[in-house]
Image: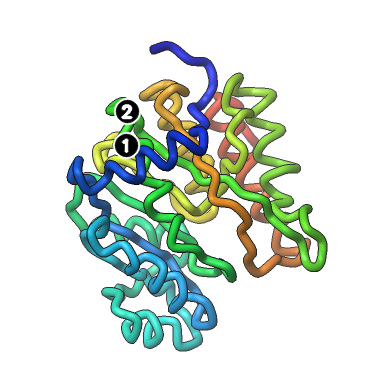
Amino acid sequence: MTMLTPWTLSPTDLERGAADLVERGIRADVIIPAKNEAATIGAVIDAVREHESLVGELIVVNDQSDDDTATVAARHGATVLTTSGPSGKGQALQVGVAATSGSHLVFLDADVLNISSHFLPRLLAPFALRTDVALVKGYYVRPLHDMPTGGGRVNELAARPILSLLYPGLGEVRQPLAGETALRRDVVDRCGLSAGYSIEIALLLDVARHYGISSVAQVDLGIRRHRNRPLEELGPMATEVLRTALTRFGVTLPND
């Protein structure tokens, strides 16, 4: 099947795929990178553990936290690993992947305030329906402070525009920077995982290049609330996203 856009699952697809996961023997190692997320990590772990039949390893990678993230994660039943050396989301995920061996992987963010137990089966559902799916991205409505929408500013102002301009078809991915991601392990073996905040967009671009845009699926996770970051923190994130997209496109940037 040839498609120029990602596969967006319908509600019927989601329900059917999620219902078939156990029968098809699809399980995933779940990896949650966390830095100073003691307030939310416990609920994220609990939501995953509601689907024990779908989980192989459940790992929290404590990215040199200054709070009780590691203690809380262990208390809620996760295996806790700790990064050493450079800190960053990509580095934390690399540590988690290296400690697991399952055929499928799920990455979840640790700062979600309204985590739901449907995140895990929905992220895995596409694998039960199509064998050519390489990468699954969650999408959702993102509130901003007291407003019902407006969150995901780096996503909307940097990631999606540059994907639309440079990578036809990938602009249809609604949340290219979503931390809620599922993929086959052989995809990681082939594409690798970038360091830092570029991890999400780099993985999306590399999967599209190696496997085609039709191998990317996206699933509706509803409403996602998390800690909104101030603008001064978002600027460096946007710069990293733009740099990754441009260099993958072949643009040579100053100081590269």
Q: Residue at x 52, y 77 (%)?
A: 40
Q: Quadrant of the N terminus?
A: top left
Q: Residues within 10 Å of mark 1 (few under 14, many from 20)?
A: many
Q: Residue at x 32, y 59 (%)?
A: 30
- Could you give the CA–CA distance between mark 1 and mark 2, rounded to whole angstroms? 6 Å
Q: Determine contact: label 1, label 2, CB under 8 Å.
A: yes
Q: Residue 33 at x, y = what percent?
A: 42, 65
Q: Amino acid at mark 2?
A: Arg
Q: Is residue 27 above or below residue 231?
A: above
Residue that label 2 marks: 130
- In the picture, measured across the screen, residue 89 lies left or right of residue 59, that is right
Q: Is residue 213 above or below residue 138?
A: above
Q: In the depicted view, which residue is nearer to us: 213 or 61?
A: 213
Q: Quadrant of the C terminus?
A: top right
Residue that label 1 marks: 127
Q: Amino acid at mark 1?
A: Phe
Report the residue that reaches farthest toward the right: 147
Q: Is residue 25 visible?
A: yes
Q: Residue at x 34, y 74 (%)?
A: 82
- In the picture, measured across the screen, residue 230 lies left or right of residue 48, that is right
The answer to which image quadrant residue 79 occupies is bottom left
Q: Residues within 10 Å of mark 2 (few under 14, many from 20)?
A: few
